Image (cartoon, grey):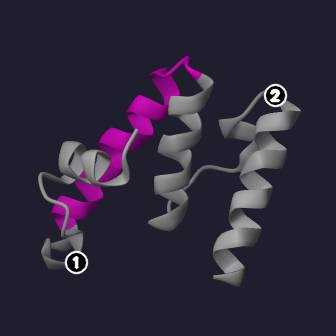
Amino acid sequence: MHFDDQLQRYFGTTGIDSLPPEAVEAGIERMRVDLGLEKDRGRRFALWSLLFLLGDAPDLDVAFKDAADRDAARNFMELTERG
């Protein structure tokens, strides 16, 4: 999953800064639905990561059943906070 591809898929553009708030909310809602339906671990992580960057990711224990996935998400959170 490429970042720009995901932005295009859920928001119809790679420049979401220019979108009205309701369009951003609608894209986030679609992402949350897809996250709930996704079975592939890598795709789930990619969706959760983008939701995290947008400030709307579900809690780790809700998003990831596997402890290794939760640890990877914690690492991602720490890396983004440093950067």
Which residue position is annotated with label 2?
66
Which mark is first along the chain, 2 or 1? 1
| Amino acid type shown at disc 1 | Asp
Residue 46 left/right relative to 75: left
Residue at 76% in and 37% down? 69
Quick check: is 18 in the magenta stretch? no
Residue at 21% in and 42% down? 9
**Residue 16 picture location, percent across and down:** 22, 69
Which image quarter is the C terminus in? bottom right
Residue 26 vs 63, above or below: the answer is below
**Residue 76 picture location, percent across and down:** 69, 59
Residue 77 vs 31, above or below: the answer is below
Element class at badge 2: loop
Residue 36 left/right relative to 74: left
Element class at badge 1: helix
| Amino acid type shown at disc 2 | Asp
**Residue 20 picture location, percent across and down:** 14, 73
Residue at 55% in and 17% down? 39
The label shown at residue 52 is: none
Magenta segment range? Answer: 22-40
Q: Camera-side residue: 68 or 2? A: 2
